[in-house]
Amino acid sequence: SGSRPAPAYTTSLPAKMRMGASYKLNNTFLFSSDFVLPLNNTPDNLTGPYFALGSTIKINKTLSVCTGFTGTTGYGVAMPVGLTVTANTNVQFYAGTTDAASFVHLRKDNNLSLAIWAVRCNF
């Protein structure tokens, strides 16, 4: 009794189209936007269009604050907030949340994310 090949099948993978733009006003303010549109209806894809408007405010050489507004079908709008500490040109420490409103008890699903040793490349 050996193994037999599995039957052939096909499955659809999630497909999205993403567009974005950013504008650097000066060395202190960076503004950005994103728009993501699902191209098919698969279980792991977005349920509808997603948008984001954001800004990065550089407080000093090592500290930046990021905030903005996001929204998508089924989840509503949110206000992400993050804090970045830059150690040198290649190392940054980041802590942020997907929705600051959850920490002032306006929503129930708060979370916090951390990224350490992230390398960012700007083109």
Image (cartoon, rainbow, N blue to C red):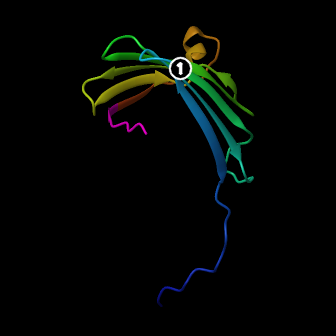
Q: Classify the position of the C terminus by image quarter.
A: top left
Q: Quadrant of residue 89 in the image?
A: top left
> Residue 116: x percent and y percent?
32, 31
Q: Which residues are magenta?
A: 116-123
| Residue 80 seen in the figure | no
Q: Is residue 111 magenta?
A: no
Residue at image coords 38%, 21%? 84
Q: Main secondary structure of the magenta part?
A: loop
Q: Toward the viewer: 32 or 43?
A: 32
Considering every residue shown, the one lying at the far bottom of the view is 1
Q: Residue at x 66, y 74 (%)?
A: 9
Tally of numbered tags: 1
Residue placed at 41% from the left, 36% from the top? 122
Local crowd size for mark 1, using a 10 Å CA cut-off: few (<14), some (14–19), many (≥20): some
Q: Which residue, given by chain and number where applicable, does mark 1 sit on?
A: 55
Quadrant in the rendering for residue 48 = top right
* Residue type, mark 1 in image: Ser
Residue at position x 54%, y 13% from top?
Answer: 103
